[in-house]
């Protein structure tokens, strides 16, 4: 009798949970929570996953994220695409899920990392919370619900895993260094594309699944106003440009923080290649963002050097660097004006006008649903861009259509939190780490600005990974600078 009652109750519970997931998806996690708590309570407490194994996977992901071509993947039904990068992140997520179930130590570390990372993790969770809240009001929930859970799998869960395992400044610095090396490799590919006039995607076309239509689009995009546009391992030159723009200040920071002259020379050469790669994309935004981010990083480092090294032989050099940054600021302002107005050719002007048209088209629709939006993944469909070669060229605009006005505000706040955290830690950490944090600050500025002209999601995995690496390292951040030496 007891077994029958238990089976009937469990069946009713499952039916109620399924019905709720269909009618009101936002309430579905309420039914999963008791099951998760029961499993954690009943599961025998085991040892945590070895930290060395988890960090090894993090470093492998830091290398594969910027290097593996996004268009080389395996797609099975509605599931997210499968790439070596994704497989590494899935493995890391599985290890994290194991630790959250069986290891009180790891659960405590995760909670502590959330508390210590402050606003960064708070805004990350808020962004996905807005996505969850948008589902009941979404137009076309059959599209929004799978898209939201896909985002949770490929972005949020890996973020939580990296946040838990990256707890030391040395691990953060190593992950960023590996990522910057990957950016150098991609930039070298972009420079080679520009020199040869041939895209890497065309060389790899036999291995690209359903490549015909995409390759035609890539071929059409590779020339603008008679100038070749590299895209390397990305699906669009704009995506490559954003990637290289946020990598450039990191490469600069490692070059400035290196102690050996030979290492500085190697990082300097890598930085030159990264800048040339950004130029090879023929993306106005990428070139301007790269110039601004490098100037900001150099200006901060030079200003602090002037204040701290009153008798150093490098003080004149620091002063010269600061003066160069100040002198270059009017040129950057003129360049920014050119980006906004669309100067530089017919293709450039059309690109700028298309962004203005998108804003004009989207504004009435946003005001119709200012809170909640139309659901995750609905922006392109709402504007009639789905299935066409064109995309919405503004991630803030996409978030406003998907999640309502709070969406872009939360993403911008997330970038501001990253920039503020990096700048604050650069004041209190060891000088070697301080320069790296200045690079992180400049990269956060690049992301915040570049997302206003790009909506491709290819770099979002990189962005959430960098967020988690920097936020996670704060869990054991010490005010004693000697403990943070890399």
Image (tube, rainbow, N blue to C red):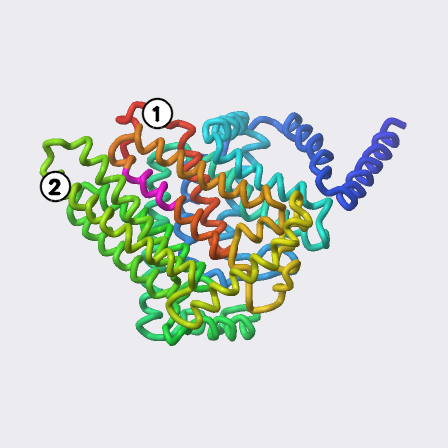
Task: Kindly tell me whether residue 359 is visible in this rendering.
Answer: yes
Q: Is residue 332 left or right of residue 341?
A: left
Check residue 437 for magenta coloring: yes
Badge 1: few (under 14), some or many (20 or more) residues near its Cα, within 10 Å? some
The image position of residue 105, as x and y in percent, is: 50, 26
Q: Which mark is residue 316?
A: 2
- What label does residue 478 carry, if any? 1
Q: Nearer the viewer, mark 2 or mark 1?
A: 2
Q: Relative to the observer, which residue lies in front, 289 or 42?
A: 289
Marking on residue 245: none
Residue sitting at 31 percent across and 33 percent down? Answer: 426
Is residue 147 one of those drawn in magenta?
Answer: no
Badge 2 marks a residue whose secondary structure is helix
Examine the image and state in which quarter residue 36 appears.
Answer: top right
- 74 over 87 or under it: above or below: below
Q: In the depicted view, which residue is nearer to us: 137 or 35?
A: 137
Q: Is residue 247 above or below residue 174?
A: below
In the image, the segment drawn in magenta is 435-443
Taking the spot 40% from the left edge, 55% from the top edge, the residue there is: 243
Task: Judge by depth and name the residue closer to the eye, 110 or 323.
Answer: 323
């Amino acid at each position: 009798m007891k077994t029958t009652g238990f089976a009937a109750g469990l069946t009713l519970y499952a039916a109620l949970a399924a019905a709720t997931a269909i009618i009101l998806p936002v309430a579905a996690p309420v039914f999963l929570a008791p099951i998760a708590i029961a499993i954690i309570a009943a599961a025998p407490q085991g040892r945590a996953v070895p930290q060395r194994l988890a960090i090894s996977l993090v470093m492998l992901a830091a290398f594969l994220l910027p290097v593996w071509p996004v268009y080389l993947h395996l797609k099975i039904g509605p599931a997210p695409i499968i790439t070596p990068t994704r497989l590494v992140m899935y493995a890391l997520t599985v290890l994290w899920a194991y630790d959250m179930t069986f290891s009180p130590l790891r659960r405590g570390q995760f909670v502590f990392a959330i508390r210590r990372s402050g606003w960064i993790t708070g805004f990350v969770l808020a962004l996905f919370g807005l996505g969850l809240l948008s589902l009941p009001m979404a137009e076309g929930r059959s599209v929004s619900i799978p898209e939201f859970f896909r985002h949770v799998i490929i972005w949020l869960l890996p973020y939580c895993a990296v946040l838990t395992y990256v707890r030391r400044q040395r691990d953060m610095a190593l992950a960023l260094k590996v990522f910057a090396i990957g950016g150098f490799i991609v930039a070298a590919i972009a420079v080679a594309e520009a020199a040869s006039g041939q895209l890497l995607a065309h060389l790899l076309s036999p291995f690209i699944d359903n490549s015909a239509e995409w390759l035609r689009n890539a071929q059409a995009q590779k020339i603008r106003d008679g100038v070749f546009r590299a895209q390397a391992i990305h699906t669009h030159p704009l995506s490559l440009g954003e990637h290289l723009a946020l990598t450039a200040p990191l490469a600069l920071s490692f070059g400035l923080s290196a102690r050996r002259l030979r290492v500085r020379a190697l990082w300097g050469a890598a930085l030159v290649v990264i800048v040339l790669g950004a130029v090879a994309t023929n993306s106005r935004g990428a070139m301007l963002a790269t110039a601004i981010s490098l100037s900001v990083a150099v200006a901060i480092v030079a200003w602090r050097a002037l204040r701290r090294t009153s008798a150093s032989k490098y003080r004149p050099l620091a002063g010269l660097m600061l003066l160069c940054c100040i002198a270059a600021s009017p040129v950057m302002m003129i360049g920014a004006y050119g980006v906004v107005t669309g100067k530089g050719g017919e293709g450039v002007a059309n690109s700028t006008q298309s962004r203005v048209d998108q804003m004009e088209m989207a504004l009435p629709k946003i005001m119709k649903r200012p809170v909640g939006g139309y659901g995750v993944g609905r922006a392109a469909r709402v504007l009639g861009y789905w299935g066409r070669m064109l995309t919405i060229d503004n991630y803030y605009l996409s978030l406003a259509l998907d999640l309502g006005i709070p969406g872009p505000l939360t993403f911008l706040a997330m970038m501001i939190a990253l920039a503020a955290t990096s700048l604050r830690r650069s004041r209190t950490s060891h000088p070697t780490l301080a320069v790296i944090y200045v690079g992180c600050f400049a990269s956060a500025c690049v992301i915040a600005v570049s997302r206003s002209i790009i909506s491709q999601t290819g770099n979002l995995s990189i962005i959430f990974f960098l967020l988690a690496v920097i936020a996670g390292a704060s869990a054991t951040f010490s005010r004693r600078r000697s403990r943070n030496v890399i």
